[in-house]
Amino acid sequence: MAVLLKEERQQLILDTLRDNRQATVAELSSRFDVSEVTIRRDLREMAARGVLRRAHGGAVAAAPALPEPPVIQRMVRVQNCKEWIGRAAAALVSDGDSVFIGSGSTATFVARCLTERQDLTVVTNALTIAIELAAAEGVTVVVTGGMMRNSELSLIGHITEQSLRQVRVNKVIIGMRAVSLEGGMTNDYLPEVMTDRTIIEMADELILVADHAKFGTVASAYVAPVERVTTLVTDPETDPKTLARLEEMGIRVIVAGADKEE
């Protein structure tokens, strides 16, 4: 076999895991004609990126983030959890604040809980958020321009990013397609990644709203490390070990609706 570049070898390792779901260090070493030390180094690097998971003697494929239905359909999925998260995240927003709220079903529940705020400015790239707050007398809504992503009813692209750079907010509240301690925050729609990164840069305080289904999965496009989050608001079904790790990273963790768990 011809000598492979590291990047080529690691891509072939991923292909192997996609086909077989798992592989041992010895198998990979024999297949690619490199030492087991080299394979272990590859697996460490790839696990750090969240594209696979280490296992005893080898590796297994990372749990993929399953395709999501459109945002309107997601509004009724695990609705209780999203409502709890929405109320808890909204409690972090005070009268007089300026806040960015991103797209997504959980973020929409946050907006629903802000209609009674006074002197509040909400910047958003999501039509769903703008509609929720349209009749709120004490809320000024600023909507970015941009290209509409139909399934999310969100605005993305360079026009959106230019608009976002012209405003300042105290807090950013976002959802995320997938969250992994090793793989970071990831999205499944490549054209949206640069918009996500611009949003994250808008304020030091980043509040992530994510139900339990978002954790331990990795989507195709890397957005930012988990450590960028300052506060996580989630529900009681999220793995306690994951939450403990996040707290060790210095992230404030709020488990919403824990007193309502059945």
Image (spheres, rainbow, N blue to C red):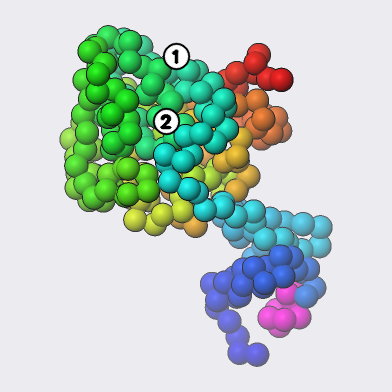
**Closer to the camera in the image, 3 or 202:** 202
Residue identified by numbered label 2: 107
Placement of 135 over or under 72, stated as above or below: above
Is any part of residue 42 visible from this angle? Answer: yes
- Observer-nearest residue: 168 or 147? 147
Which residue is located at x 32 percent, y 25 percent? Answer: 132
Q: Give the class, few, some or many, for how many residues have Cα within 10 Å of label 1's Cα (few <14, many ≥20).
A: few
Q: Which mark is residue 91?
A: 1
Q: Is residue 30 above or below residue 58?
A: below
- Where does residue 70 sit, x and y in percent of width and height? 43, 46
User: Is 260 left or right of 189, judged from the image as shown?
Assistant: right
Helix, strand or loop at mark 1: loop
Give the magenta part as a residue range: 28-36
| Residue at image coords 49%, 57% | 220
Task: State whether residue 230 appears in this view.
Answer: no
Horizontal relation, residue 161 to residue 151: left or right? left
Identify which residue is drawn at 53% across, 45% down.
178
Which residue type does callout 2 highlight?
Ala
Quarter of the figure with the C terminus: top right
Q: Quadrant of the N terminus?
A: bottom right
